[in-house]
Image (cartoon, helix red, strand yellow):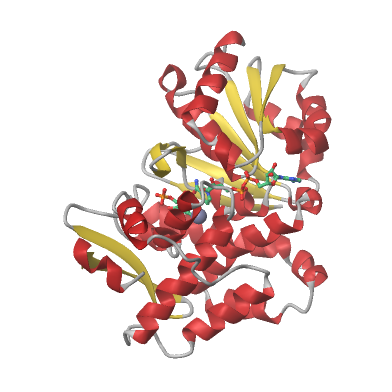
Amino acid sequence: MYEIKINLAHKSYSIFIKNGLIDYIGKEIKKNYKNKKIAVITDINVEKFYGEKIMQQFKNDFEVKMITVKPGEKSKSLDTLEYLYNELLDFEITRGDLIIAFGGGVIGDITGFAAATLLRGIPFIQIPTSLLAQIDSSVGGKVAVNLSRGKNLVGNFYHPEAVFIDPILLRTLDKRFLYDGMAEVIKYGCIRDEKLFKSLLEYENEHELFNNIEEIIFRCCSIKKEIVEKDEKDTGERMLLNFGHTLGHAVEKYYNYEKYTHGEAVAIGMYNITKRSEDMGITEIGTVSLIKEILKKYNLPYELPNMDKSNNIKTIGLDKKNKGSYMNIVLLKKIGNGFIKKIKREDIEKYI
Ligand SMILES: NC(=O)c1ccc[n+]([C@@H]2O[C@H](COP(=O)([O-])OP(=O)(O)OC[C@H]3O[C@@H](n4cnc5c(N)ncnc54)[C@H](O)[C@@H]3O)[C@@H](O)[C@H]2O)c1
Ligand SMILES: O=C(O)C(=O)C[C@@H](O)[C@H](O)[C@H](O)COP(=O)(O)O
Ligand SMILES: [Zn+2]
């Protein structure tokens, strides 16, 4: 079993990674939690595959309730949040109990935000089930819901008590969402780890990728740990994790979260901002062609769709990396070497 400890000034917690962990997760949780109510929040797809399995783990030792929402980004909304608050209150949950986020990034983000805010904070655990959630969203404490104006506009930093990752759960993941997660894996390679990037280019097939998935998850979570420990609140280095997201979030929102998944939109964002920065002489020549090659290999889009530019600029105006009249954008010097560039708001058009 891999264990990665996240050490923050105010809290520490562990990420456990092991094939088959789902089969004894109840025992692991029981080591630290007794006599508690547990509310498991999930979506319909994950419930279909693993609902019974997870309930089986808790039903003898805890009073447990499963709360299920519709799958997909549209569920990361204020309406779903209110539904969750009501279900949790019907269960008479208290701050002495436990909430479990059991699903992909959508479930992790909304459950984390509900846990952060209901009764001013209830402890929660992440059991991520999609690749994206296992390598990115379950770690680091960013929790949020979307508003109609944009992504993650209402949120908080609220860390889980622990993260339990079982890569075997990825076997039932739809191929589209496997690649969706690969976009964020590629992101880590771009900003921090040329070796990871190159190995992703070299895998001959999906079988080889799956053979290495536990290590890939470990590597991505380790990079995130290093960055989050230095800059938990996203005021500096953590912004690197937002590579491709300035434009990506605008693309997702422009199509009302229906046309592109988060990872697909981030792929478009990474390619297009790098194309511009390479043209401007900021990024080493050849970088964008490597990004194109890797995105094509993992069935990810890269071309910017024909969108209304002024609408995009308006959405980007709400990006959380903005500070007053300045924006922070994430660019690459080359593969494996990301940096943050401070630009004037009016200059953003040059980069997107
Ligand atoms: N908090 C963060 O740091 C952070 C980081 C990256 C992304 N995010 C957020 O994460 C979200 C995207 O996450 P996602 O890609 O996991 O989307 P998702 O939660 O919608 O999951 C993708 C799909 O896979 C299904 N699924 C999940 N696990 C499965 C399994 N094991 N077997 C079968 N089906 C399964 C889900 O039902 C869903 O249909 C976005 O909202 C994004 O903004 C947050
Ligand atoms: O953990 C981070 O920091 C990230 O930026 C990770 C991103 O992959 C993720 O999509 C995050 O939710 C984006 O955050 P936001 O601050 O741009 O809303
Ligand atoms: Zn992301």
Report which quarter residue 345 is drawn in: bottom left
**Count of marks overlaid on the render:** 0
Residue occupying the point 60% across, 37% down: 107
Classify residue 200 as left or right of residue 323: right
Expressed as whole percent of the image width and height from the top left, the position of residue 17 reads 68, 51
Report whether residue 333 is seen: no
Which residue: 60% across, 16% down? 87
- Relative side of 207 to 37, left or right: right
The picture places residue 4, in percent across and down from the top left corner, at 57, 52
In this rendered view, identify the residue nearer to me: 217 or 77.
Answer: 77
Quarter of the picture holding the C terminus: bottom left
Reply above or below: 204 against 253: below
Residue 21: image x %, image y %?
76, 44
Instruction: Report if residue 2 is visible in the image.
Output: yes
Q: Residue at x 42, y 38 (%)?
A: 148
312 and 241: which one is in front? 312
273 or 50, nearer to the observer: 273
Which x, y percent locates residue 138? 56, 45
Snapshot quadrant of residue 290? bottom right
Above or below 285: residue 7: above
